[in-house]
Amino acid sequence: MKKFRIPKSWFFLSPMFVLVTLFFAVPVVITVVMSFTDMDYSFEWNFIGFMNFQDMASDFLIPKVLLNTLVYTFATLSLFNVGMALLLSLLTTSISDRLGDFFRSLWMLPRLTPSVVYGLLWLWIFDPTKYGLVNNIRAWFNLPPQDWLHQTPMLMVILANGFIGASMGMLIFTAAIKAIPIDYYRAALIDGASWFTITRKITLPLIKWQILFVTAYQTLSLLTSFEYILIITDGGPIFRTEVWALYTYHTAFESFRYGYGATLSVILVLVGIAAAFVYLKLFGFEALMSKPRIEVD
Amino acid sequence: MPEIRVVNFCKYFGKVKAVDNVSFDVKDGEFVALLGPSGCGKTTTLLTLAGIYKPTAGEIYFGDELVNDVPPKYRSVGMVFQNYALYPHMNIFENIAFPLRAKKLPRDEIEKRVKEVARKLMIDQLLDRRPSQISGGQQQRVALARALVKEPAILLFDEPLSNLDAKLRMLMRAEIKHLQSELGITSVYVTHDQAEAMTMASRIAVFSMGKLVQYGTPDDVYDRPKNMFVAAFIGNPPMNFLEGFTVVGDNQKLHARRGNIRVELPKEARNRLENAPRENLVLGIRPEHIKIHFKEKENTIPGLVYVLEPLGRDLIVNVKLEDTDEIVKIFAEPGVDFEEGQKVYMEPWVDKIHLFDPQTEETLL
């Protein structure tokens, strides 16, 4: 009789498998299960069916939070994480390598700063008193100090996230642009194409896959990230910057409504999955992966 | 009036002298090859003609116009790249149309000209394919079509055939030569393949280490190489070199001698060698300029048949010299049988013998 043997590869895969299960799969399952309970600070698994989902429909904050999330994600993504990232990589690859490296390093600096310090720096820059950096500069021109965080809180949140978020796209786009064979550019130059034409007709189409990746990845990370908002405005003033992830956090860890909080995050996961599928369709993922039809003559 | 004039052209990258004081001209409608090993400066020269690089020093003229600072788009050049540089995300039609779109020609004019050039190069059935969906030979034609479609005054080729297999390379070699002479476009062709340069070009510029070593017709560089580098680089198999010869002689004849070996030198040697060094010279003779004898004879070099290389039409006999172990390659006359280990006597054609100064590597004879 042949003895059943576990393939060796399973053994080598097991540490990763355990980690993924423990820290990704299990929490998702627990969250989904928890979303059907009204668990609060007493930590009791009290199943209430779809009550949480019904509550969400009547939650007067949801439309506000939804709109905030949409504005925050779309604006940060298009203006900074993809838009500014593209602009930076296109510009810094069009100048000399040394100058390009210098500007890219400058944009990388926030990544080296601890999140809390980075958040506090923004608080200092836009401090409503004359000691804030921006108001200090305004004072040179005899302009009165402004309370930026109350007047335009969403803009502050978008700026803070965008300035740090653009560097990831910038790195990936720069690497992609530098990987494009230089002869494409030489051929285009000889054929009389301008910088703008070359960018539009050659560079952008050739880094389409990287743009898709950064867009998809950054959408998901913006939907779920809230640490800078927590530090800078804490969702305020009066919910003007309360985004979905932050609302989830507030519900679960300030109001101690774990069940309802879990429901909110389940919705976020579903939205994220839907967004990923839309992107893949939009960028023609199948066409990107299609096999060439080579014939030999 | 020459179409292209390169005058004292230098291109440095930092401290590296990629091209150092090179001058040559290309006549209107001429096909010139820049030949040399990799890193010799030939591609740098070509890219400077295209306007991608600017000269560090010197001048480049197209006709009467100094073009040193003219950007590529105003130079009316078409270029074919080694890797073809076809845009992978565009179909063949769009690839060929790219230079015309950049010129903002009307739509129907673009269509007409693309189809015309595609028909000429026999790729008109591929216009809706992507570059990844056609073969290397077809890609080569598309690259050529893209260079030709804008009807350039000058065509530049950067090793266009080196990515093709040997058979296709021979085919395209003849086709490019035919196309060039038919269209009469002034062409500069960079290659490291001496066979390409010899077969296609009317003149060859041999480059070495950033310098132009010799510029002349294929016959010039083949029969009258300026130094040992050119002599060794051109010809396949290359010229045979034998070291350590001394020129001796009386009023009648000059000979090159090494030990017991004595080889007769041509009449003009007397004048050419008048002020030249006479000792420790290198004797050079091409494989097809040696006659093999089986009996001892005057003015021959004895040796043993080392190995035979039959090529079908030709036979290359490798002969090893007994005293120095030097190997001499010879194209043998057809119909003669050889055996390995056989003793033979090699007689160089008198008027095809070269002598080189090993110090300067310059040609003396």
Image (spheres, grey):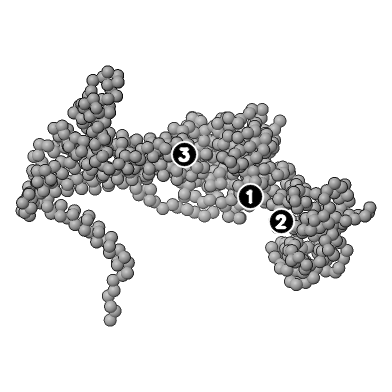
Which residue in the structure is indicated by mark 2? B238
The numbered dot on residue A291 is: none
Q: Which residue is at a point 41% across and 53% down the rendered structure image?
A: A291
Residue at image position (17%, 55%) is A29
Local secondary structure at mark 1: loop
- According to the picture, the residue beneath numbered tag 3 turns out to be A97
Alpha carbon separation for disc pair 3 and 1? 29 Å
Which residue is farthest right?
Answer: B251
Residue A69 appears in the picture as rendered = no
Q: CA distance from mark 3 to mark 2?
A: 43 Å
User: Which residue occupies the foreground of this view, B306 or B8?
Assistant: B8
The three-letter code of the residue at mark 1 reads Pro
Image quarter hosting the N terminus of chain A: bottom left
Q: Nearer the viewer, residue B268 or A249?
A: A249
**Is residue A25 visible in the rendered structure shown here?**
yes
- Which label sits on residue B37? 1
Residue A235 drawn at (x, y percent)? 17, 36
Q: Where in the figure is residue B321, as x and y percent of width and height?
A: 77, 66
Residue A264, given in percent of the width and then of the height, sits at: 15, 45
The answer for which chain carries disc 3 is A
Residue most toward the front? A131
Q: For the residues tagged 3 and 2, is the chain the same?
A: no
Q: Position of residue A77 (x, y in %)?
A: 29, 38
Q: Which amino acid lies under the numbered mark 2 shown in the image of this protein?
A: Pro
